[in-house]
Image (cartoon, helix red, strand yellow):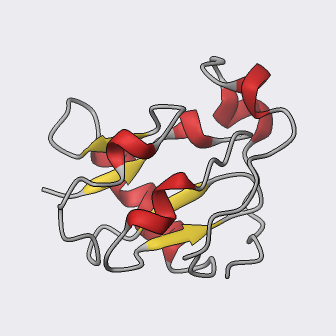
Amino acid sequence: MTYIVTDNCIECKYTDCVEVCPVDCFYEGENMLVIHPDECIDCGVCEPECPADAIRPDTEPDMEKWVEFNRKYSEMWPVIITKKDQLPNAEERDGEDGKMDKYFSEAPGEGG
């Protein structure tokens, strides 16, 4: 099992999860985070830290596409290990449907 980030993170990008990760497997895009599935040690400490409920175990139904999504972008984006402020519209975008089609950006974040 591994943990992955879903589209609930898009336009929120809370980073509470990165500070508790013991293996630094989070990577930062412009408007979301991903977890490298091969680096995650399945400890689960990140999942309860996410206010947007965007971190899920890969054992849930229909998570295969998210595992590959996380793998792809974790190999393109910089690692992030330091908590930052969430995005300005995080509270209003939290739980919004269709965020992938509306807002997703392939651009990397700053990392750090």
Question: Is 87 on the left or on the right of 111, as rendered?
Answer: right
Q: Residue at x 67, y 82 (%)?
A: 112
Instruction: State the image coordinates of residue 46 (x, y, percent, origin top left).
Output: 36, 53
In terms of image quadrants, where is residue 11?
A: top right
Quarter holding the N terminus is: bottom left
- Image coordinates for residue 65, horizontal then vertical, percent: 36, 46
Quarter of the figure with residue 40: bottom left
Residue 95 placement, left or right of 91: left
Q: Residue 88: where, in percent of width, then height?
A: 87, 40
Residue at the (30%, 67%) spot, across then down: 37
Total numbered badges shown on the rendered structure:
0
In the displayed structure, 10 sits above or below 40; it is: above
> Which residue is depicted at the point 70% across and 40% down?
12
Residue 27 position within the rendered picture, expressed as x and y whole percent measured from the top left = 55, 71
Q: Nearer the viewer, residue 107 or 56?
A: 56
Q: Compare residues 77 and 45 and report the one nearer the observer.
A: 45
**Identity of the residue drawn at 47% across and 38% down:** 54
14 over 89 or under it: above or below: below
The answer to whether residue 6 is left or right of residue 42 is right
